């Protein structure tokens, strides 16, 4: 293997690293010069430029199968698409940061976001367990620091510590699980693990390895019963990093989870149909999905803080995504990816609106949203679009995302004319999705129904910010009316990957 | 072409959103024009529909690929049943806007939400792809909530949320049912006509039918899942009550008739008697409860349960009389409920600020608001099922169908009609022609001068009265259309 070849393949990651370092340099160069707004603008420009170039580099990097370069990196149409999507989410998070960032160390903040993004892109193309683990740690360490960034605020410090402790333990679980998988297969590369699984028998140590790995991922993806860090972290973290954790980090996490399950643990699925349980990872995922959907959505109802509400709804959404994984089919993976992207974009939008409210009203209680339509009609309309899409009502993207997810899960493993085996879980999912409309409507009621307090002033963020949020809302509407725009690329990329070599 | 019914409403809603807040009059006129365009499309479609031995049942077909991965198409079409309900939607839309002419608080939002509901209703009646149908069915939920929660009266937020909860439970059941149909059929399509060729095992039909049927029937006010209706209707502003009782309840009955029953006929057979029992209870219970209400809107709200009970009973009667009676009753009740809510909500409540029967009785409304009194009398007579009005012909057909299928329930339904007459007369007498207290008799000249009935109210009331009279006196064009659509491949198996 030529080293230069390797450098070409990690071109986007290199660009991101350079951009992150440039942010630090720009910050030091501008220290004490110009206003803080000017410095923020410069940093946004540097970071944004870096992201755009990295996006271009994604397409310049040559393709690679998992078999190349020791199987470390997979660069396929699918990974390209998702790298671009993660970069896009990072760009939105950066624009959000520019709008609401307070404090002195903006350069570090931007650099950390970029490093986290670097970790995510590596994660997406990771073709073997070690790269996946290292990339996960790079992402997580950056995110821990981002969460605790406002070090003088107790909430932020607490959130960072909780996130770090939970994350550290989960990393330990994951590494331990990986070690069993390696011990079983004699290789850390996903395709070879799958080969070993097909020839080998079901051994206790393998089962232990799978369970440990899933526990680790359960923490990372905020699935019940490993979700306890989520509400505190979302609430205490600076909002732009909370938004990024909920969107980009979740997308990358589910991507790599689907990869490990789909290509690494192929042949060890088992089944979770009614009266058709079989040992494997599907029943585990099904139980995690069930718990996440129920506990996330039910707990969200009683929240008074919108950030916490979104955190619990994020747990519920992790449940839907895990539900999609139980299909254990290419269609199921495509449905999960589609929904994860939609969810990421929508939740970024919702967090962006919450961030601005926090900036202008000093809090994110439900009462801070009262009468928002008077003070920011455009943002209110966008929030309406985001929340209704999260609730899964038409004609928005969340509606089709859920519809597709539920249909593929029901369809998997059910032959025509037979009783659908996954009905029990899908019925719960549909019911929970209906339930979620309640708490989203509570927020919308504050915005649209209640009369504004006279003391509140207008909410008027910058044009760039309003434009970004508006574009997100338009994207959610367009993808809802014409989901093929995103569904077709994802589906064909997934199908190509599954149809290719094992 | 038929798509312009809901497209025009969607465009209208979008334009309203973009309108400056101060242009109140423009908003009103824009809404009225939009609704008129949509109803004109429906009327043109109605007259252009060809009946005859070799005419297609489903006309105005529009088909194009939408989401090929799931076999989802945009498939629009109309048969006689759709057309009748389209006309009803258009009629209630136009009159609803006429009766909302006095909305001063955030009128552009009001009309935008109103038009969104209308668009959803049109869409449901036209969709022959189940995904599309479900999309329109769900589109209605959030605008309903806002209409009631923002512009409603008495316990509006409670009523709005209750309505949403029931609607969502309904759509959850419908979604589970639809996905089951898709998966079990194995045809990889959501096209209604194609799915009707699939055969579903009886074991699946046995549970899938009640799931799907109930999902729709909740919206149609099936007892004991009806409680959203009276609360919601009472809390809603006039136009929303008209729309909820007039059209939205029909979405449920239509869905049951169009989707649940033709696709799962064996399931229908298993549950036929149960549904008949529940609908008959609904007829009697709705009438009985209406008899003791003090709030005039609650009287009408419960009378809707009673009238929709007839529709549901007719649906499960399973014969030509039943189906044609059900559709006629949907139209008739739609127009009459709209008229009754318009009189109570707009003409009386907006002037007298009360709906309590005792208070109204002492206000001498029969003399003070004679137009309202006359309209309400006509509507009441029509709702009681007097010959000459649409209610008579509809209920007569239903009773014939029910008698053929299950005579006992038909007899009980007749008892229901008698109670209907009782509560209608009671409400009419107490609200408009009540005894004035003896002391006030002397001060006759000082009776409060109500604001006069406006032109838009007269126009709206006139339209609704004329329609119900016309259909009552000359129902054959409607009946011909409905009978024609019973010949379709969907309905053939049901008779």
Image (tube, rainbow, N blue to C red):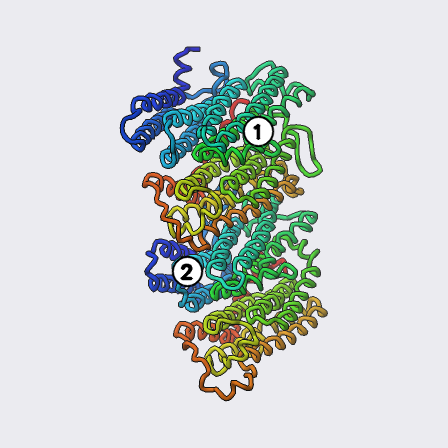
- Image check: A241 left or right of B296? left
Where, quadrant-wise, is the N terminus of chain B in this rendering?
A: bottom left
Q: How many marks?
A: 2
Where, quadrant-wise, is the C terminus of chain B in this rendering?
A: bottom right
Question: Which label sits on residue A219?
Answer: 1
Q: Residues within 10 Å of mark 2 (few under 14, many from 20)?
A: many
Inter-mark Cα distance, 1 to 2: 47 Å
As drawn, the residue found furthest toward the bottom would be B442
Residue B51 showing in the rendered view:
no
Circle 2 marks a residue in which chain?
Answer: B
Name the residue that disc number 2 marks. Answer: B111
Compared with A292, B470 (above or below) is below
Compared with A372, B395 (above or below) is below
Location of residue B143 in the rendering, given as x and y in whole percent from the top left corner: 47, 55
Disc 1 and disc 2 in contact, CB within 8 angstroms: no
Label 1 in the same subunit as label 2: no
Residue B304: quadrant of the picture: bottom right
Compared with A171, B171 (above or below) is below
Circle 1 marks a residue in which chain?
Answer: A
Considering depth in this image, is B117 or A177 the residue closer to the camera? A177
Secondary structure type for disc 2? helix
As drawn, the residue found furthest toward the top would be A2
Residue B436 showing in the rendered view:
yes
Secondary structure type for disc 1? helix
Location of residue A478 in the rendering, given as x and y in whole percent from the top left corner: 41, 44
Location of residue A275 in the rendering, given as x and y in whole percent from the top left corner: 71, 37
Compared with A288, B440 (above or below) is below
């Amino acid at each position: 293997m030529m080293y230069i070849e390797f450098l070409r393949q990690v071109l986007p990651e290199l660009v991101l690293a350079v951009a992150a370092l440039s942010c630090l340099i720009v910050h030091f160069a501008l220290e004490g010069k110009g206003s803080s707004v000017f410095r923020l603008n410069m940093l946004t420009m540097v970071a944004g430029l870096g992201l755009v170039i990295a996006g271009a580099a994604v397409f310049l990097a040559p393709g690679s199968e998992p078999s190349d370069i020791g199987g470390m990196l997979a660069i396929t149409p699918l990974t390209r698409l998702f790298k671009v999507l993660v970069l896009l989410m990072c760009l939105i998070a950066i624009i959000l940061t520019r709008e609401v960032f307070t404090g002195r160390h903006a350069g570090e903040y931007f650099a950390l976001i970029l490093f986290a993004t670097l970790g995510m892109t590596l994660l997406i193309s990771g073709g073997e367990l070690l790269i996946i683990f290292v990339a996960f740690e790079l992402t997580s360490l950056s995110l821990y620091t981002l969460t605790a960034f406002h070090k003088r605020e107790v909430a932020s410090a607490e959130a960072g510590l909780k996130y770090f402790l939970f994350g550290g333990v989960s990393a330990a679980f994951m590494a331990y699980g990986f070690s069993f998988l390696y011990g079983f297969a004699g290789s850390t590369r996903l395709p070879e693990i799958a080969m070993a699984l097909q020839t080998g028998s079901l051994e206790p140590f393998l089962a232990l390895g799978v369970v440990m790995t899933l526990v680790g991922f359960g923490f990372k993806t905020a699935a019940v019963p490993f979700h306890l860090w989520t509400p505190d972290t979302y609430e205490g973290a600076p909002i732009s990093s909370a938004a990024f954790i909920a969107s980009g980090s979740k997308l990358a996490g589910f991507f790599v989870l689907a990869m490990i399950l789909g290509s690494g643990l192929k042949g060890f699925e088992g089944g979770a149909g009614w009266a058709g349980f079989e040992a494997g990872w599907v029943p585990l995922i099904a139980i995690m999905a069930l718990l996440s959907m129920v506990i996330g959505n039910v707990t969200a109802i009683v929240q008074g803080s919108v950030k916490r509400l979104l955190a619990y709804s994020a747990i519920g959404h992790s449940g839907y995504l895990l539900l999609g994984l139980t299909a254990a089919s290419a269609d199921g993976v495509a449905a999960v990816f589609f929904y994860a992207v939609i969810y990421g974009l929508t939740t970024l939008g919702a967090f962006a609106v919450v961030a601005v409210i926090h900036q202008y009203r000093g809090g994110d209680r439900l009462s801070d949203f009262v009468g928002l339509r008077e003070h920011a009609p455009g943002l209110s309309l966008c929030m309406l679009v985001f929340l209704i899409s999260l609730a899964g009502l038409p004609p928005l993207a969340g509606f089709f995302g859920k519809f597709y997810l539920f249909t593929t899960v029901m369809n998997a493993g059910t032959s025509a004319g037979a009783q659908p085996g996954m009905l029990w879980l899908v019925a719960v999912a549909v019911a929970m999705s209906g339930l979620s409309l309640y708490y989203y409507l509570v927020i919308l009621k504050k915005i649209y129904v209640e009369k504004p307090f006279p003391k509140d002033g207008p909410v008027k963020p910058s044009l760039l910010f309003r434009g970004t949020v508006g574009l997100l809302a338009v994207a959610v509407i367009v993808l809802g009316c014409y989901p093929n725009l995103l569904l077709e690329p994802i589906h064909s990329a997934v199908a190509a990957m599954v149809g290719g070599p094992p | 072409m038929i798509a312009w019914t809901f497209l025009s409403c969607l465009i209208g809603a979008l334009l309203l959103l973009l309108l400056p807040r101060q242009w109140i009059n423009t908003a009103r006129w824009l809404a009225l024009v939009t609704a008129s365009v949509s109803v004109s499309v429906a009327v043109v479609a109605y007259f252009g529909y060809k009946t005859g031995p070799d005419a297609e049942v489903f006309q105005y077909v529009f088909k194009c690929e939408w989401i090929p991965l799931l076999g989802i198409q945009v498939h629009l079409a109309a048969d006689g049943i759709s057309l009748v309900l389209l006309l009803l939607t258009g009629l209630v839309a136009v009159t609803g806007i006429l009766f909302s002419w006095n909305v001063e608080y955030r009128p552009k939002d009001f009309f935008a939400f109103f038009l969104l509901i209308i668009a959803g209703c049109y869409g449901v009646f036209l969709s022959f792809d189940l995904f599309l149908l479900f999309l329109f069915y769900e589109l209605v939920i959030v605008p309903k909530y806002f209409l009631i929660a923002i512009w409603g009266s008495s316990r509006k937020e409670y009523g709005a949320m209750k309505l949403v909860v029931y609607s969502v439970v309904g759509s959850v059941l419908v979604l589970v049912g639809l996905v089951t149909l898709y998966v079990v059929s194995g045809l990889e399509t959501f096209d209604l006509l194609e799915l009707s060729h699939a055969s579903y095992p009886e074991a699946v039909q046995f549970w899938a039918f009640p799931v799907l049927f109930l999902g729709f029937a909740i919206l149609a006010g099936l007892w004991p899942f009806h409680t959203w209706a009276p609360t919601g209707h009472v809390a809603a502003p006039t136009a929303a009550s008209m729309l909820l009782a007039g059209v939205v309840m029909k979405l449920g009955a239509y869905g049951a008739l169009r989707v649940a029953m033709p696709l799962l006929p064996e399931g229908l057979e298993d549950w036929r008697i149960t549904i008949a029992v529940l609908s008959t209870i609904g007829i009697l219970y709705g009438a009985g409860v209406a008899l003791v209400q003090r709030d005039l809107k609650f009287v009408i709200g419960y009378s809707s349960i009673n009238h929709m009970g007839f529709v549901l009973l007719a649906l499960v009667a399973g014969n030509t009389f039943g189906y044609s009676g059900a559709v006629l009753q949907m139209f008739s009740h739609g127009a009459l409920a709209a008229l009754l809510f318009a009189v109570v909500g707009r003409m009386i409540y907006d002037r007298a600020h009360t709906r309590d029967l005792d208070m109204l009785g002492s206000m001498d409304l029969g003399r003070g608001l004679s137009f309202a009194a006359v309209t309400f009398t006509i509507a009441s007579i029509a709702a009681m099922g007097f010959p000459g009005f649409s209610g008579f012909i509809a209920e007569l057909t239903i009773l014939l169908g029910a008698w053929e299928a299950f005579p006992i329930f038909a007899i009980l339904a007749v008892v229901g009609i008698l109670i209907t007459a009782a509560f209608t007369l009671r409400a009419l007498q107490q609200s408009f022609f009540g005894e004035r207290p003896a002391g006030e008799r002397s001060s006759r000249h000082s009776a409060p001068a109500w604001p006069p009935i406006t032109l838009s109210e007269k126009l709206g009331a006139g339209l609704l009265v004329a329609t119900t009279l016309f259909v009552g006196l000359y129902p054959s064009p409607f009946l011909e259309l409905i009978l024609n659509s019973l010949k379709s491949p969907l309905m053939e198996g049901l008779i």
